[in-house]
Image (cartoon, helix red, strand yellow):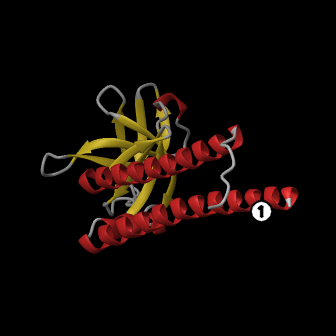
Amino acid sequence: MPNRRPVTKADVGKAVMTVVNCLLILMILLFSLVLTLTLLKGGTFSIFGNSWHYYQSDVMSGEVERNELLIINKDTPDTFQPDDLIAFYATDAKGTRVIQIAKLISVSDNYYEVTEATGDPFILDSTDTVFIGKVEMHSKLLGHLVQQMRTKEGRQIFLGWSVALLLFSCGLTILLHVRSDRRLQQLQADAVG
């Protein structure tokens, strides 16, 4: 039976770091799952002070296409500048509150002159309009990923890859911890022998 060395503070520190690493990975996986479920339900979620929206309208075709993912910075209307893409809530023909975007042309007091892809300007009154903010970025690729995650197969693939990544990360962490312990034991054996 090999001699066991006493447990040192370094050993405890490594073990704690391994557990913390695995817990962080689990939290990231849980966070991803929550974001996915939120996105699947309403097509929108907020993180890091930005609003992310799966855009399903052709109103701004040419500027922003259908099925793109919009990243909207939650700015106040007084920070809007001409040529900004701004996001606001509007009511569609069915009476449903939807996210709409338009390009800002000019601002006069509480009135915001905006235009959609058709080029026809219209006025938004800031006392009646709920502004979300300024569109900072839009992405077809991220929109395509969201579109895929909204399918049953896409969710299975996303969750499968997430679990595989989690298991790989935890396994790699444990493997590195074990290899480090073996290397330390070998060094100590060489020093004694």
Q: Residue 187, percent across and down?
A: 81, 59
Quarter of the figure that contains the C terminus: bottom right
Q: Is residue 122 left or right of residue 176?
A: left
Q: Residue 74, percent across and down?
A: 46, 36
Residue 61 visible within the image: no
Q: Is residue 187 left or right of residue 140?
A: right
* Residue found at x 46% / y 50%: 28
Residue 25 visible within the image: yes
85 or 176: nearer the eye? 176
Q: Is residue 100 left or right of residue 48?
A: left
Q: Is residue 98 left or right of residue 83?
A: left
Residue wearing tag 1: 186
- Does dot 1 land on a helix, a strand or a loop? helix
Picture layout, residue 70 above or below residue 156: above
Check the image and name the residue furthest to the left.
94
146 or 75: nearer the eye? 146
| Residue type at numbered disc 1 | Gln
Q: Residue 147, percent across and down?
A: 33, 67
Q: Residue 25, percent across and down?
A: 49, 52
